Image (cartoon, rainbow, N blue to C red):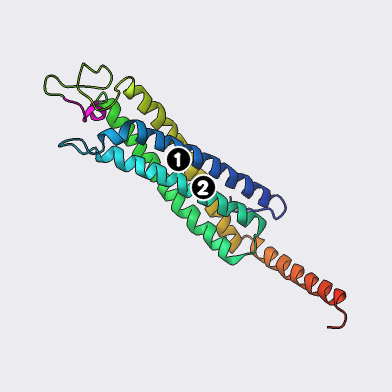
Amino acid sequence: MCSFDKDKGPGRLMKKGLTLILVGHINFILGAIVHGSVLRHISKPTQHISTEYTVANIISVTSGLLSIASGIIAIVVSRNLHEFKLQIGLLVASFLNALLSAACCAGLLLAVGITVAQNGKSLMFGCNETVVPINARSPVSAQCPFDTTRIYDTTLALWIPCAILSAAEAGLSVWCFIIGLTLRGLAPCGNSYIKEQLEEAAESSSHTRCLMEQHSNPEV
């Protein structure tokens, strides 16, 4: 897992970065749709606070944004493997994104479980339920500030892909974090020689550049 090929490794890191950007964009868009169509109506209804839904969705959107940032850093690192600051940036961003994406996946699965167990009653907190209890699977006529048509199916259809994408983000971020450890020669990837190879390549490139400059300016 700690192996990194100096020739093929940059291309793979760039592909992982592009995938992170794509997955992050999709997750961010799905989270925004969930908030705009459902959660903005029930986040602060009268005498009710749907904390688990709000927190899960905020983490989902934040995870999408951080995945995009991590993907951009991974792409930049793939073109500048020997840069110390970029390697540290990859380590920090991928580590934080792995934790946040894992938390996002767990939170969304919890929200899905609560919704299924309660038949979507939490999704109907903003409605007038003085007559009979309301559930989202078979909502009765009620005064709601939003459209309740298929709200249960729509919410689950958005949350489940978000949870899957969050798991993918976590896996990609862990891979990028391990690559960062490999590039820095840190444990448990300290046995890799890629750090020394990159340093030698950087020194050789610098020496070649100096020779070319001296050749182009013989008076110096």
Image spot of residue 146 (x, y percent): 28, 26
In the image, 1: left or right of 28? right
Bounds of the magenta span? 121-128
Dot 2, crowdedness within 10 Å: few (<14), some or many (≥20)? Answer: many
Image spot of residue 190 (x, y percent): 57, 62
Question: Which residue does the numbered mark 1 point to in the structure image?
Answer: 28
Q: Quadrant of residue 138?
A: top left
Query: Cβ–Cβ below 8 Å for labels 2 and 1?
Result: yes
Q: Is residue 4 above or below residue 166?
A: below
Question: Which residue does the numbered mark 2 point to in the structure image?
Answer: 68
- The quadrant of the image that shows the C terminus is bottom right
Q: Is residue 188 visible?
A: no
User: In the image shown, does 15 or 102 lie closer to the viewer?
Assistant: 15
Residue 59 painted magenta: no
Q: Is residue 115 above or below residue 99?
A: above
Q: Is residue 23 above or below residue 193?
A: above
Dot 1, crowdedness within 10 Å: few (<14), some or many (≥20)? Answer: many
Residue at point 47% right, 54% down? 95
Sequence-wise first label, 2 or 1: 1
Image spot of residue 57 (x, y percent): 35, 40
Gap between marks 2 and 1, in whole Å? 9 Å
Query: In the image, which disc is placed on residue 207?
Result: none
Q: Amino acid at mark 1?
A: Phe
